[in-house]
Amino acid sequence: MAEQRPKKQNKWFVKKGEAGGIDIVFLILVLCLLGFGLVMVASSSYVAALHKYGDSYHYISRQLIFAVVGLVVMLLVTVFDYHQLRRFSLALLIVSVILLVLVLIPGIGIKVNGARRWLGFGSFRFQPSEIAKLAIILVFASYMAANYKRMKEFKVGILLPAAVLLLVCGLVAVETHVSGAILIFCVGAVLIFVGGASLKWFLGIGATGVVALAGFAILTPYAKGRITTWLNPFADPTGDGFQTIQSLYAIGSGGLLGLGLGQSRQKYLYIPEPQNDYIFSIVCEELGFIGAMMVIVLFVLLIWRGFVIAYHARDKFGSLLVVGIISRVAVQAILNIAVVTNSIPPTGISLPFFSYGGTALLMLLFEMGIVLAVSRYSRLETNE
Amino acid sequence: MGKGPSRSIVIRSTVMLAIFAVILLIGLAAVLVNYQIVNYSFYQTKAISQQTMDTTLAANRGTIYSRNYTELAVSAQVETVYIAPNSIPDDEATCRLIASGLSAILGVDEEEVYAKTQKSNYYEIVKRRIESDLADQVRAFVDENDLAGIHLVNDTKRYYPYNSLACHILGFTGTDNVGLDGIEAVYNEYLQGTSGKLITAKNAVGTELPIEYETYVEAENGKNVVLTIDETVQYYLEKHLQEARIEQQCLEGAAGIVMNVKTGEILAMASLPNYDPNQYYTITDEMVLQSLSTLTGEELETETTNYRNKIWRNKCTVDTYMPGSTFKIVTLSMALEEGLISLGNTYSCPGYIRVADRIIRCWKSGGHGHQTLAQAIQNSCNPAFIEIGASVGTDKFYQYFQNFGLTEKTGVDLSGESSGIWFSTFNEVELATASFGQNFKITPLQMITAVAAACNGGELVTPHVVKEITETQPDKSQKVVKSFETTKRRQIISQETSELVCSLLEQVVSVGSGKNAYVKGYRVAGKTGTSEKIDDYVATGIKNYISSFIGFAPADDPEYAILVLLDTPSAGEIYGGIIAAPVAGDILSDILPYLGVQPQYTEEELATLDIAITSYLDQPIEEATAALIDKEIKYVVKGSGDTVTAQMPEAGTTMPQSGTMILYTGEASPTKDITVPNLVDYSVAGATNRIKQSGLNVRVVGNENAGSDALVISQSPAAGEVVAEGTVITIRTNSSEGVSSM
């Protein structure tokens, strides 16, 4: 009995001697972004919170709780051996596909603002697409690490992953959660590419995908409307273009140095829910170009450090896992900033670490925990 | 499974890292540079314009002063109540409470207020321009019930303390404080000032932000306008005109002007019917209201609109008329100046004159017979003036007509001035009628301006009603920023001609058709006029007239000209000499002493002057009687006491030299027991007898040179009133001999 226990422990937890400490640089970058994000949630939300709930701290207090819980979860995750995640990957994918189907059924899925994206009971709600995101990363990392040698084959490297990816993306898109579908698609595509798919096929399929996407944009009225708004938000300044225009006013009026932290004027009910998707425009307005670039540089550093961890991961699964997670953060940040600056058609996508949202933050920090867990097995450190 | 990622994974990961970094650090950074640095000012301007709220700070409108710095139009701070329906909670009870509360305080319709609360905007005016006491009540109501969405903003309101006095000169302002008529409109630019601005930050819902972001641009108050109008002269002009208008039942109103002939300053200008600029939309004129009272329905509406336009019209500058015989002053001036006639000329009037193929009749059907030039003027003989006009000739006549400023606007600083109507062709016949002021039209102001030129030494001046523009200094003193000097336009006739015109016209008043305009102690000159309203006759077949008198004083050195115009008198008399000249006389006798023109009495006049009565109360009877004897005042004593206990007439009044003073002593006191007899239509002598027999005193007012047939036309107090013994009864005589001229 006494011998069994440590053995069982060894299976789930990080074994002593095998792994080193977590990557401090990455941890610091995560904490910087999280801290920055919390400050901005506090600043951007207090007017809206006061207006809607009569309590300036309504949003920030909730976000803080999730941040603290999320940090605990993140650090806890590093205690576990990430290899065990391979066991759950396929199950998680199946569960998320089931949930994605369930959410479409009226009466089960909860409809908010015309989109049926949520599952839950009582006050607890979550988006199955959030789980699907992680499931795709886990499944792909696991699958590609296992089938590494056959990845150049069309069937193994392209066909199967693409089929899974399209199934999941299709289900998410049907919820009219276009941004979620795009994000999952991009992360999947990055993993297929990094995982070793034949370049010829990858680019061929990619080109086909772009054409398909263009067709989708032209054919569906929903997407078409978004594109019209994107091309000329000033055509309907009080309707469809309102949010975009208000965002641009905020960004532009920030100038080089900004109006000062807490001094945003656009958060005074001009930008709807400034603590959510458009929080970056408040950063631009309050902290100017300098502040906005600080955010961007922090993200770039995080991505860089993430990839450094991936390079030095002990195995391909760990490496691809980190690439997937970091790509998810990178793509999401890029899409969000692009939307906020009207560089791409508007779609609802949040800014990691910054946008208000408890479960999303929890998931993000959980994923950061996985990256830190992988960092413990860095070859760099073991070599030293 | 090899250790660590493969070379391919590392390379492809690096590619991805590069792609992400490039998109973020170059692509999106470039986008931000574009918005935040390149196009910064564009977005900043747009953002600020939506984030800020401009509150206009109303500038105080300047004051309009009379020439004596009496305030004729002032602005006061008031408040306007408005509601923001969108800020009012959406429940029935609150909206009802607001409606009933505001309706009770402000006297507005409750349902109307309720309807406004149901709208979905932020600005619905409940009542404009309320005084501070009402505003305080509204504030109390809001506090008491803790209501949202009821607001008060500062505003200004225009007040005209003298109501209708000089209304056509002052004009009025509209709801937006912009002058719509008169000086208010013409000098609006000076009066209105520049409004200030308070820029505050606002949120998307329109309420203010807690950000210290406020810019304050102070309002620049309007400048003040000082008129040439003298409120006292204006008052007398309006008073006498109104009395005459009612007495003579002038259906189309009356007009009058008093002008300084040397400077062109208008001292008074009145047009009746008039209005109260405090409530310019309301008809307040009694005569108008009376004629409207018989109407109903659509007719009432149409006529109300008609009359509203009439009360706003300044007859002196906007309406044109045929000046009639008053124009003979101009014909006389040009003929004298051209040397075509002289005092030695004689004229023969058989009652008509033949001009081309037409026969033009004199107003006196039997004719004036043989007359000198002076007599022709006194008689206002038409054939004589047709002859004079003919000697001038059409070209010269029109040239003088132009020189007298009668073909163009006078340039007075009032709005809506007309410039008159001249003949389409001007030949022999037209010249004949024009010579006595018929068949062309000019404005009363043009006419008095021309006469001013004829009597002031021959110079045409521009009439004006504004003397200067001032700025109120912080210490409340007035600093003149602009003065309006006399504008002399041209010399039309020589000084000598002008003097001759003056003396000839003085005779019109002293012995001729204008004798009812005579004022004791003053040398008044002038000319009467009665013109047919030919347009009316053509249109309706009814002969209507305009009776007028135009004059000036003192005749030896004219300072003030006066014009009195009665439009469509319908109480019987129509002749200017009978009904317009006495009005001018009354006005002049009130205003000349006020204006500081020293009276110069003749011996005869001195004998008829009134005595000022001082108080003898409480004096010993011997002392009082001694004083009266000393002053050559006749007296009687009633009662047997030692001291004077009462006197008639009372101290501070005046009594003719012929009057008898009654002193009461002891128990005796004046009792009102004498009924005033009717004196109207008696001869002056007869009336005087009746008054004296009743134990009353008599004062005769009117031309001393009135003929023996002069009758009493009015009396004060009226017949039937009960008065005390010794009361002075004023009777007005009117000369009817030689004044019934056209």
Image: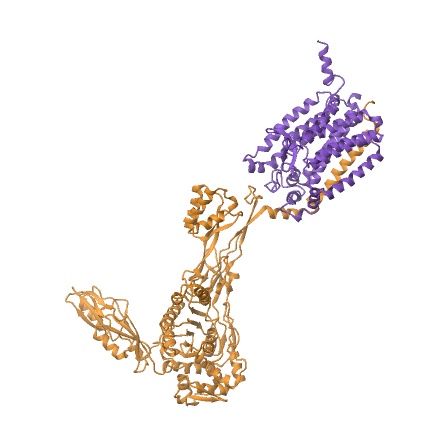
Chain colours: A purple, B orange
Residue B34 sits in quarter:
top right
| Furthest residue toward left | B640
Give above or below for A123 relative to B330: above
Quadrant, the N terminus of chain A? top right
Residue B344 sits in quarter:
bottom left
- Specify whether residue A312 is in view: no
Give the residue drawn at x 58%, y 38%: A48
Residue closest to the eye, A56 or B88: B88
Q: How many marks?
A: 0
Quadrant, the C terminus of chain A? top right
Relative placement, left or right, of B125 versus A191 is left
Give the residue drawn at x 47%, y 43%: B92
Relative placement, left or right, of A48 versus B429 is right
Relative placement, left or right, of A330 versus B261 is right
Residue B576 sits in quarter:
bottom left
Residue closest to the eye, A220 or B307: A220
Give above or below for B106 relative to A222: below
